[in-house]
Structures are given as C-alpha cells and as structure tokens.
Amino acid sequence: MSTPTPIDIHKEPIRLSQFLKLANVVQDGLHAKIRITEGEVMVNGKPETRRGRKLVANDLVEIDNIIFRVKTADK
C-alpha cells in the first residue's frame, strides 16, 4: 500500500464530493456525483456511494488507485 497523500481541509467535516474537488481528482460536483454513485470511490477501505458522506481528519479516500488522507490544516 502506498503512503496516502494528505489533503488539508480548513473545517471539519467536509462532504466527500467537496473533498474530491479539493484533491483535484474531479472537475466539478457533477463529475464527483457520477464517480461516487458509480462506486468508484472508497472511504476507509469500503465502497462509498453517498456524495454527502461527511469526512473528518484521518479518513482515507481512494479513487483511481490513489489514496488521500483528510488532514485538518494547521491554524
């Protein structure tokens, strides 16, 4: 397993669709919705089909065999 790429968020929680946009793996909300509802995204090792899924620090998101870790930005 590769080391997850940390993506800083400014406020917890963050919606899965917003996180995918922040990580630059989707172009917009519609693209995020399609990828999520098609079962192409995993959260903490499990398939996730809810685009409104709330993510918090240290959650792992996998898409296209790339793993991202939710990280709260340092203040």
Image (cartoon, rainbow, N blue to C red):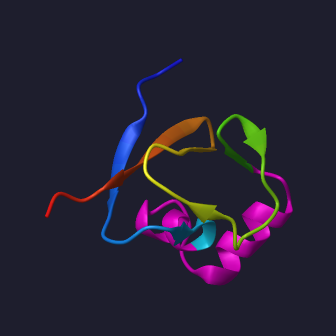
Question: At which x and y percent is residue 46?
Answer: 77, 39
Left or right of residue 3, residue 41 in this image: right
- The residue sitting at the top extreme is 1
Q: Nearer the viewer, residue 28 or 46?
A: 46
User: Is residue 61 one of those drawn in magenta?
Assistant: no
Instruction: Reply above or below: 2 against 30.
Output: above
Left or right of residue 19, residue 48 in this image: right
Image quarter of the N terminus: top right
Question: At which x and y percent is residue 58?
Answer: 45, 43
Q: For the magenta stretch, what is the residue range?
A: 18-40
Residue located 24% across and 59% down the image: 73
Left or right of residue 54, residue 4 in this image: left
Q: Nearer the viewer, residue 75 or 1?
A: 75
Question: At which x and y percent is residue 67?
Answer: 52, 38
The secondary structure that dominates the magenta segment is helix
Image quarter of the C terminus: bottom left
